[in-house]
Amino acid sequence: MELMLTARQVNARTAKALGLVDQVISRHEELVWAARKAVLSGRKNKGPGLVARITNLMPARRLLAQQMRKQTARKARPEHYPAPYRLIDTWERFGADYLQMMRAEAQAVGELMVSPAAKGLRRVFQLMERLKAEGKSSDFKARHVHVIGAGVMGGDIAAWCVLRGLDVSLQDREMKYIEPALKRAQSLFRKKLKDPARVSAAMARLRPDVDAVYVPRADVVIEAIFENVEAKQALFRELEPRMKPDAILATNTSAIPLETLASVLANPSRLIGLHFFNPVPQMPLVEVVYSEQTDTAERIKGAAFCQQISRFPLPVRSSPGFLVNRVLAPYMMTALKLHRSGVPAEALDAAAEAFGMPMGPVELADTVGLDVCLMVTNVLGGAEGAASPEKDFIQSLVSAGKLGKKSGHGLYLWKDGKAIKHPENARGYQLADLADQLVKAYTDECLAALEDGVVSDSDLLDAGMIFGTGFAPFRGGPLYYLEHRDSQAGVVEPEDDDQNGSNPPHEEPEQETETRV
Amino acid sequence: MSEASNVQGLPPARRVVIAGGTRIPFCRSNTVYAELSNLDMLADTLQMLSTEFGLAGKKIDEVVAGAVTSHSKDWNLAREAVLSTDLSPATPGITLQMACGTSLQAALMLAGKIATGQIECGIAAGTDTTSDAPIVFKRKFARRLIKLGQARTLKQRLQMLKGFSLSELAPQPPANGEPRTGLSMGQHCELMAREWGISREDQDQLALESHLKAAAAYEAGFFDGLVTPYEGVSRDNNLRADSTLEKLASLKPAFDKKFGTLTAGNSTPLTDGAAAVLLCSEEWAKANNIPIRAYLVAGRSSAVDFVNGEGLLMAPTVAVSELLQQTGLSLQDFDCYEIHEAFAAQALCTLKAWEDANFCREKLGRETALGAIDRSKMNIKGGSLAFGHPFAATGARILGTIAAILEEKGQGRGLISICTAGGMGVAAIVERN
């Protein structure tokens, strides 16, 4: 049940231990021959063990089903994701009678398959395949990546590339700026690789490189220094003549137009943007930024590189905020506007979550960092960037040192990495109305971005927003939602008798919503 | 610089092309490759070679490979490894073993067949792991188990258990030593170091140079085409780029605690790894778009009477001397030397013996000493002390390396010398012009 409810994948050895498979063969044996032998020797499945049989009895089933519902509720709301709940129901009712259970399941699967949520999720799968196909036409394969700037982004990009098997050199002005990045990398490797020998092997592939000696050997050079035009231009001038002619030259900037940086290059068409999101290990999307003058081949190589490091590449045209930040800004600004007009943060976040967002806009702003939000709005300029009461409001918070999660105080107070929320504040608000206003700001900007040609089509836009911001996956993406909203689940108002705060703690989902420049 | 035609090596029939080699990074035993078997590493290395040279689906005339520390279940190691790659299943695999000379010997045997036109192409490879060492029961208990299996009646079975003692169950791990003398390699090498008066300082110096040269070669990208990243490792994990004489000097003797000069720093560690080299005829290279990095022109094996007092690891002196005699070359007629460093002391003993007129006269039957080699041409990209030494893989590692060195130089001639257990040595000459 756990495997079905969570879609957790297990390796062959675990599957054998769980009794899912009867036999595991080594990679030097042949499946067909092993199967032939098993058949000819009349091998039979041993069936479930004693514990499994006891837990399938009615009293145990009832108890376990309750447990499962509770655990499932932490990850998915029934009105958004009905399938796991149907699965539990069917098992609880018919678990003892195999045939009846099969019949009930067939019925349930049939109904669920044509539900709007299933359609939305199938679309997510197709969008994922679409992103996975980006860059497939290139046989570019990197072995060595050189990252310049050992700050949070640069350091984490470097560590991630190492984790995906590449050799990485990490450059900064002095060793003391690189050391914190090495430390963070080590704790990431420990968490992901566990085996100390593998951890030290990974650390050996992450080389501090103050003198930039590895530039001529790198297949990919990623610039991630502070956002300063002159500094970046000077860097690119130095880099270009030292690089392999076919290496990727990329910037992680989110503030400076690609064209401005490329202008100092002998070959301006080679520069691309590789815009990673923070935290790098959790965010599956990378915006591959190109401008009018960018060589298409370079852009495709950039996408191929993203595939190599298991990130989804989203090709976006160089424009303020690219896609993800551009859409998030008005969404969060609208939340702030409502907040300043007196709507409690808790109500706004609850509304967005009831819609299906993994995290509400206020908490998101705090998580991203208010200083970063401020910078994004500056970059965006225009309506949002121009002086506005909301911007002044953030400015005042930032000036007071209230940066959000990282400083422990922003729009919320934070404790142990969690926002302190008072669910009673949300009571009495029409979440559906609030959600409508928030989502409208979001989808309006999506339409504008599509109109401006930031991405080439609506599928890419939906894909980007789902994998970049966690936009309610069961809704199939913001544009798909606009088209199909009438058939999709509405926002369900919480029952008044709130079970002491319906805000389950976030359990670090694989795809977080956090995003940061 | 010389012309290959000067060398009277293998029959003049055909030249043997070294297309190139690849290997996985070598790792100290019981580290990253601890869970892997010889079959895993050999198959993966062959696959890397196949990918590198576009051999998928192609029939290779012979794959000759082996391992020194091997399980009895790996009795058909080379063929099984081939079947786990994308090489054509019509490729035969021959499992061969000659201790640390295994994969160089494999290459020489393939070279003979290519030169005489028996085959067009072949892969020489070797793998070793001491992380997955076979641990077996004592013979007495093994016999008991076999007989038990043959017994028909309960009475017979009970009889088989007669005289059983628990001590029979003590497993026997393989020993890294000489069966005839009961000494380990290191202990034998201590004896040689004492005989030839090789100082601790000289050994440490050689070890240091090996590490520094290897590290520099890695930094310069020399190994990018020779070492394929594997299991999250991209460089040999024995390599110490920050090694210093002080650090090496601080280590305690490993084999002779009181008077010894061999330490963990100037001896190779137990190592896991695999390496492979593609050899072929010029015609086959051309037809299959395979680069010609160098030619393997001559080879020789030899052995010494170590049981009766000769230095266990001194046989390469003989192999090289005979090879020079055969080809009419002098020891100084080479542009690069790849002298395997099982121990710093062993490499230094070899060099000293060549310079020793007495030794050359009495042991090698020469009128004068072979002389000194230009040390600046020796192991210029590092040696086994830095990379580690997975016994059977070392020959293929060196062959791949020397071909790449000659390619980098553009032309020239190189000498390979490898010592092995059992008092044997293998030498070979490689050229590019």
Image: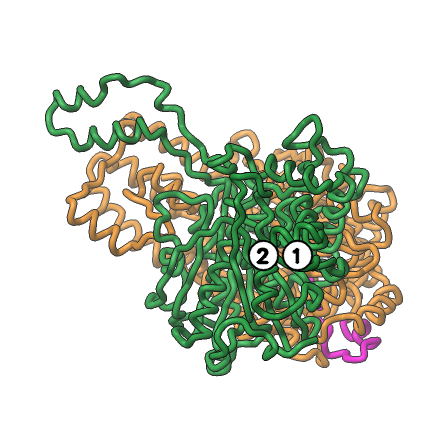
Highlighted range, magenta: A258-276
Q: Image point 69% across, 61% down: which residue?
A: A145
Whole-percent x, y for residue A357 in the image: 57, 50
Q: Amino acid at mark 1?
A: Asp
Position of A415 with respect to A89 (left or right) is: right
For label 1, the residue is A167
Position of B252 with respect to A429 (left or right) is: right
Chain letter for mark 1, please. Answer: A
Q: Amino acid at mark 2?
A: Pro
In which image quadrant can residue B249 be found? top right
Whole-percent x, y for residue B372 in the image: 74, 58
Q: Residues within 10 Å of mark 2 (few under 14, many from 20)?
A: some
For label 2, the residue is B229
Palette colour of chain A: orange
Position of A149 with respect to B59 (left or right) is: right
Q: Which chain is green?
A: B
